[in-house]
Amino acid sequence: MSDEWSVLSGAYEDVLLPRFQPLYNFLANLILKHIASSPQEKKLRLLDYGTGPGEPLLTIVKLLKDNQIENIQYEGMDLSSGMIALAQQRLKNFQIDLNHSDSIANSETYAFIVSSLVLPYISNKNQLLQEFYQHLNNGGLLITCHWSKASQVAFLSILKRVILFMTNNQESVEGNLDDDSSFSCANEELTRSLYEQQGFRIRDWLHFKLSMSFPDIRTFLSFARVAPWFNDENLYLKAESEAKRILTEEHGKNFFENKSFQLENDAVIIIATKN
Ligand SMILES: C[S@@+](CC[C@H](N)C(=O)[O-])C[C@H]1O[C@@H](n2cnc3c(N)ncnc32)[C@H](O)[C@@H]1O
């Protein structure tokens, strides 16, 4: 999977990051609000686990600096070397430790651990949450966000189906992300118990509507630009027609009138604490 993330990193950065920005802004504001409510002189450490191209971290750093909060030491880590290379580029103007790894190797503890859109891809969520717990200060905050239900992540659901359609002799694929074992979103009850089993107390469970807008289908499908069919005109048209079919039949989008479209996705933000 890490290689897959490296292959996808450029497309992820171009196609998805700008559309996830409202979510990153929301996360950054949560942290700002928390710090502003109990200002401290001492240095606080913040880790962004699975930072990808580094945009959540960049948004947090900029917002805190704009608000004269300078006592934070930032770190980011990601399993994918391609993602870390992008993060190094995006964050080059800031002094941030970025590590290519999937486990927190140091013995440090953090005041904040942030992990945005990573948990669905983790097969052993218990183990990761345990690691977060061990590396969080008493009273520290773990802020994670993911999706409320796999089938409600419209953009990913449609992209996966089109990609499968193209690798499956152009046969339509039924079903949705709920059936995809490499991407799992547990329901609220299960997720709460996962966190609580590790000792976390859930302070807030927030719902965030993420509306993603695309100027046209090609921009949307360009997330798969590394796929051989994307640059073959005939094959591309088949993929586009399948995407239009799904969007029209299942998402009520009408492409005769308007070529741009919006997809609505439901995200969940969990704020958990150790105390
Ligand atoms: C959907 S991206 C999210 C990136 C970033 N957090 C964001 O919100 O834009 C998922 C990221 O998780 C990373 N990832 C997946 N499994 C991981 C693991 N076990 N340890 C660390 N990073 C992981 C991937 O490499 C990828 O960069």
Image (cartoon, helix red, strand yellow):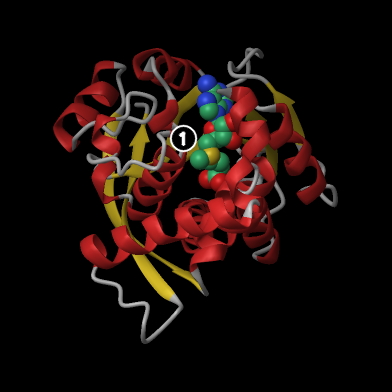
* Image-quadrant location for residue 211: bottom left
* Image-quadrant location for residue 182: top left
Residue 49 shows in this picture = no
**Residue drawn at point x = 40 percent, y = 21 percent:** 129
Q: Nearer the viewer, residue 38 or 125?
A: 125
Q: For this view, does 201 lie left or right of residue 105?
A: left
Q: Which residue is mark 1?
A: 167
Q: Amino acid at mark 1?
A: Thr
* Image-quadrant location for residue 68: bottom right
Measured from the top left, where is residue 154 in percent x and y? 33, 54
**Residue drawn at point x = 36 percent, y = 65 percent:** 263
Q: Residue furthest left?
A: 189
Q: For this view, does 118 lie left or right of residue 84?
A: left
Q: Secondary structure at mark 1?
A: helix
Measured from the top left, where is residue 85 in percent x and y? 78, 36
Measured from the top left, where is residue 210 in percent x and y? 37, 62
